[in-house]
Amino acid sequence: MESALAVPRPPPHDPGTPALSVVDMHTGGEPLRIVLAGCPEVVGPTLLAKRRYMRQHLDHVRRRLMFEPRGHRDMYGAVLVQSELPDAHLGVLFLHNEGYSSMCGHAVLALGRFALDFGLVPVLPAGSREVRINIHCPCGLVTAFVACEDGRSSGPVRFHSVPAFVLATDLMVDVPGCGKVVVDIAYGGAFYAFVSAEKLGLDICSSKTRDIVDAASAVTEAVKAQFKINHPDSEDLAFLYGTILTDGKDAYTKEPTTNICVFADEQVDRSPTGSGVTARIALQYHKGLLELNQTRAFKSSATGSVFTGKAVREAKCGDFKAVIVEVSGQAHYTGTASFTVEDDDPLKDGFLLK
């Protein structure tokens, strides 16, 4: 029976705390919660300075949106901010269960659609079939290409990455419970350790998620303890974001290669991981396993969703040989929400179960 209730008034809430209005999307199953309104101004002369400011002064916004009871430990979010770059259509800060990442490919794919559909780019010429949207991420300027029809987004989105490069190959680390493990480390806007799941006694497609999370997290902690990450542009970018376990099929084939990413505080990416695909393409190109403009498909072992990627041209990042990578995937809208706070709520800033 259809409800006869009128549109409800806002629930009781602290009048001094603005409601947080959001649009929810997902890309390949990985959620993205985009803040429309209610976040206080994020100040700073650069995007990286804004990222530091939000961490130090506005972290309650992240906790309220990412954590229970409004979110969950694998929720992901985006706060839109002004960019200091003249070519950028928007700037973005990425939120997760542990803090603030430097890059997020699945979010860029979703934000491309969002920016077009919510009028964040200039009016398109009549008959436009694709629009270019420059998104300033903490790692740098990333260009999204959004298919459109009658001024609205339609179909997959693709993006061109910042210069992606390999930091280390065949790095031996001592992983508790696994012994000596050989890993590669590559950058696709964020740094990842890569290792075949088989080397950890796991099957990427059939092992329990808990076992995959434990093993990947152990690798991440081992690399952090035994290897110093550095980035030629900024210390703000010099951290290991997570570990990506693969099926070991790095040599080129037309069949999808499967992986799963465990990042931040044991957060599991449901998608193939856009910045991870970027880094993995850079790694395969570095090893001579992939040519320029040779497209590979990457499949998430969590959901079966697929991104495609290819190295489109060579580049440099400091002294590192790098490539610009194109990643393509499909994002979808899932809803909107308005989140409120009651001042006497002891859990108003959220909590996580582990």
Image: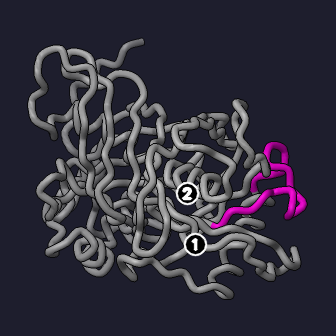
Please say whether residue 64 is visible from this viewpoint: yes
- Identified by mark 1, the residue type is Leu
| Residue 275: % across, % down | 50, 54
Report helix, strand or loop for mark 1: strand
- Identified by mark 2, the residue type is Ala
Measure the C-alpha gap from mark 1 to mark 2.
Answer: 10 Å
Q: Is residue 26 left or right of residue 172?
A: left
Please say whether residue 354 is visible from this viewpoint: no
| Placement of 350 over or under 259, stated as above or below | below
Mark 2 — residue?
279
Quadrant holding the C terminus: bottom right
- Looking at marks 1 and 2 on the same chain, the residue that comes earlier in the sequence is marked by 1
Mark 1 — residue?
167
Q: Which residue is at a point 67% across and 53% down the rendered structure image?
A: 288
Q: The magenta stretch spans which residues?
A: 193-209
| Placement of 151 over or under 216, stated as above or below | above
Q: Is residue 344 left or right of residue 6?
A: right
